[in-house]
Image: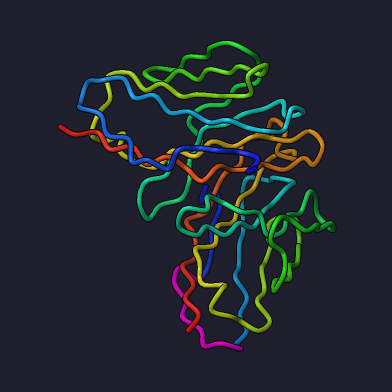
Amino acid sequence: NAGVTQTPKFQVLKTGQSMTLQCAQDMNHNSMYWYRQDPGMGLRLIYYSASEGTTDKGEVPNGYNVSRLNKREFSLRLESAAPSQTSVYFCASSEVGGGGTDTQYFGPGTRLTVL
Amino acid sequence: QKEVEQNSGPLSVPEGAIASLNCTYSDRVSQSFFWYRQYSGKSPELIMSIYSNGDKEDGRFTAQLNKASQYVSLLIRDSQPSDSATYLCALGSSNTGKLIFGQGTTLQVKP
């Protein structure tokens, strides 16, 4: 049982390049989330998917797109990377969704640097 | 005003002491509250969740919730150097169904 996995672990991009961060969970969870974490800012929600086939914006969605490919996989795409998107990105999942009473389980993170 | 406020610290305590971490929030609708621990370079992991006013104990950890005063705290008894980490407070909003995190408090436990 791997829990939540993310690829890649590290990535360096040049401004304007695109990339997709991959996330998968094997816990049969309904909901999945993408966060970014910057020094002194805590975790900020980018997008989430309450269930397969649905996605919704979080606090900081600009410059990102997401795809809930199936129940297991939730990808985050940067179409044209900017230095302001240098951050650590975490994917998380929860059983029922909504964050109301559910525990969210986090992946190991992707450390992205945009030059 | 941020929705979830934490003192970023660092909070430094000697080994064996009680560490007290505090969090205030502005959303009166929130029904669920969580404390996550995050070691440097690692991902957050859940320590405690609390939904009702009062105290909830789990081993050396006690979460305290006061909805009237809009604060939640985490006490760590008999602090160990292995407790040195950043502690993130989060609340679940029944309105939006999402978790909102504070910026985290860094705890240093000195041997």
**Eyeballing the image, is A2 above or below B67?**
below
Q: Nearer the viewer, residue B69 or A97?
A: B69
Residue at the extreme top: B54
What percent of the width, then of the height, locates residue B17? 25, 20
Residue range highlighted in magenta = A8-16
Please identify the residue farthest to the right as the structure is shown: A53
Give the residue displayed 62% in from the left and 75% down from the top: A20
Q: Is residue B20 above or below residue A42?
A: above
Q: Nearer the viewer, residue A95 or B93?
A: B93
Place of residue A45 in the rendered image (x, y in percent of width and height, measured from the top left): 66, 54
**Would you say residue A14 sits in the magenta stretch?**
yes
User: Which residue is drawn at the image coordinates 61% and 41% (left, top)?
Assistant: A104
- Seen in the image, is B1 located left or right of residue B39? right
Q: Is residue A98 above or below residue B111?
A: below
Q: Quadrant of residue B20?
A: top left
- Looking at the image, residue A23 sits to the left or right of residue B63; the answer is right
User: Residue most toward the front?
Assistant: B1
Q: Is residue A9 above or below residue B92?
A: below
Viewer-side residue, A3 vs B17: B17
Q: Is residue A90 left or right of residue B61?
A: right
- Residue A10 quadrant: bottom left
The part of the image, by quadrant, that contains residue B3 is top right
Q: Position of residue A99 (x, y in %)?
A: 70, 38
Direction from residue B20 to residue B23 in the image, left or right = right
